[in-house]
Image (cartoon, rainbow, N blue to C red):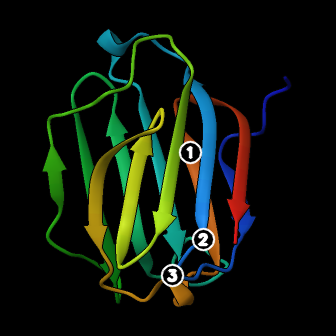
């Protein structure tokens, strides 16, 4: 399957029941601290608020956060990172009463909405990954 460009931007409309499925592979060994970042923006530009940021430091930790009025809020971190060095992954972010995050079919993380998902207008996938597909299901 061919790769998508990285960073990969996509206009989106999210509501309860929506999900975003991202398939890809880290492009560097975990020893070099590659990262995966998914941002849900409230407008069509990168300076807008971020309703949800999911950032994986492969082999290290995961950070979840939001940016309101240009200010980063209190981040949530976890040391549990179920991605495997050099192996393809499937990341699924589902919208319910919180963002529910699955990695390779297993629910791993949750992040309570601070900005309503209906405010999200664009998503971006970036950093050190090769993307094979990004799908938004409503």
Depicted 87 relative to depicted 16: above or below: above
Mark pair 2, 1: CA separation: 21 Å
Number of residues whose C-alpha sits closer than 10 Å to that of mark 3, classed few (under 14), some (14–19) or many (20 or more): some
Depicted 72 relative to depicted 28: above or below: below
* In-image side of 46 versus 70 (left or right): right
- Frontmost residue, 108 versus 72: 108
Q: What x and y, as percent, mark residue 17?
A: 56, 74
List the single residue furthest toward the right: 2
Name the quadrant of the N terminus: top right
Q: What x and y, as percent, mark residue 110?
A: 28, 60
Kindly indicate the quadrant of the structure image that contains residue 9.
Answer: bottom right
Q: Earlier in the sequence, mark 3 or mark 2?
A: 2
Q: What x and y, as percent, mark residue 8?
A: 69, 50
- Frontmost residue, 8 versus 106: 106
Local secondary structure at mark 3:
loop
Q: Which labelled disc corresponds to residue 126?
A: 1
Residue located beneath label 2 in the image: 18
Q: Which labelled disc corresponds to residue 20?
A: none
* Residue depth check, mark 3 versus mark 2: number of the one nearer the observer: 2
Depicted 90 relative to depicted 18: above or below: above
* Residue depth check, mark 2 versus mark 1: number of the one nearer the observer: 2
Q: Which of marks 2 and 1 is nearer the N terminus?
A: 2
Mark pair 3, 2: CA separation: 21 Å
Depicted 39 relative to depicted 132: above or below: below
* In-image side of 45 versus 61 (left or right): right
Q: Are marks 2 and 1 in contact (CB under 8 Å)?
A: no
Q: Which of marks 1 and 3 is nearer the N terminus?
A: 3
Kindly indicate the quadrant of the structure image that contains residue 49.
Answer: bottom left
* In-image side of 125 versus 55 (left or right): right
Q: Which labelled disc corresponds to residue 48?
A: 3
């Amino acid at each position: 399957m061919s790769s998508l460009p990285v960073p990969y931007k996509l206009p989106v409309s999210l509501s309860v029941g929506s999900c975003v499925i991202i398939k890809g592979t880290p492009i560097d060994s975990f020893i070099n601290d590659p990262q995966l970042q998914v941002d849900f923006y409230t407008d069509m530009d990168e300076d807008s608020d971020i309703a949800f940021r999911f950032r994986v430091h492969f082999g290290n930790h995961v950070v979840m956060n939001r940016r309101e009025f240009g200010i980063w809020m209190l981040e949530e971190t976890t040391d549990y990172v179920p991605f495997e060095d050099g192996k393809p992954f499937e990341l699924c972010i589902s919208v319910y009463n919180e963002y529910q995050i699955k990695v390779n079919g297993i629910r791993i993380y949750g992040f309570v909405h601070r900005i309503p998902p209906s405010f999200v207008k664009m998503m971006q996938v970036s950093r050190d990954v090769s993307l094979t597909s990004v799908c938004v299901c409503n």
